[in-house]
Amino acid sequence: MALSIAIPLHTFTASEVVTVPATNIPTGNTHAQLLINRNVGTNSLEANPAASISWFMEFSLDGGQTFGNGAGAGTVGGLLASGGHVSDVGDDLPGDPQSTLRQVRGSVTNGATTLSVSGSLNLT
């Protein structure tokens, strides 16, 4: 069963970090994707070429006791050459897809300027 965890619109201060709490991964899911919307809010990533932001997700195979096997990415402000409005990172989920002990958590870290983004963590 697919699961999408919303990251609500947030205006970051310089160097602020927002976390996505640990969440159980539904059995059968094999892929995770963390998406950042670039064109939202009053200080959007698209409208601020001096901005930068990074995001990271990591996984647990033991019910949240330990985390590792992460994937992350980062981007700078301004318009994407591709014309899109989303930056993302995706990864295959580690462990047995039938395990009920798998979890995922994430974080979004802002750079030196005030910045507005939203996003989602999607499990499929």
Image (cartoon, rainbow, N blue to C red):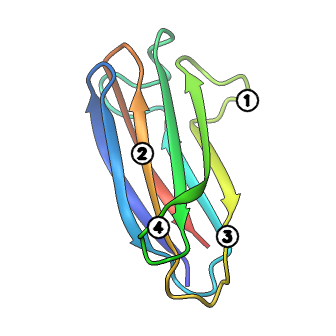
- Whole-angstrom CA distance, mark 2 to mark 4, is 15 Å
Lower position in the chain sequence, tag 3 or tag 1: 1
Badge 4 is on which residue? 4
Relative side of 95 to 46, left or right: right
Give the residue type at disc 4.
Ser
Query: How many residues crowd mark 4 within 10 Å: few (<14), some (14–19), many (20+)?
Result: few
- Whole-angstrom CA distance, mark 2 to mark 1, is 25 Å
The percent coordinates of residue 31 (x first, y second) are 66, 68
C-beta proximity under 8 Å, tags 2 and 1: no
Residue at 40% from the left image edge and 25% from the top image edge = 44
Residue at 52% from the left image edge and 44% from the top image edge = 56
Lower position in the chain sequence, tag 1 or tag 4: 4
Give the residue type at disc 3.
Pro
Q: Which residue of the protein is positioned furthest toward the top in this rendering?
A: 50
Give the residue type at disc 2.
Ser
Badge 2 is on which residue? 107
The correct choice, above or below, for 12 with respect to 4 in the image is above
Front one among 22 and 45: 22
Lower position in the chain sequence, tag 4 or tag 3: 4
C-beta proximity under 8 Å, tags 4 and 3: no
Give the residue type at disc 1.
Ser
- Whole-angstrom CA distance, mark 3 to mark 1, is 30 Å
Q: In the structure shown, which secondary structural element does the residue marked by tag 1 occupy?
A: loop
Q: In the structure shown, which secondary structural element does the residue marked by tag 3 occupy?
A: loop
- Whole-angstrom CA distance, mark 1 to mark 4, is 25 Å
Badge 3 is on which residue? 94
Residue 82 is marked as 1
Residue at 44% from the left image edge and 14% from the top image edge = 48
Q: Quadrant of residue 12?
A: top left
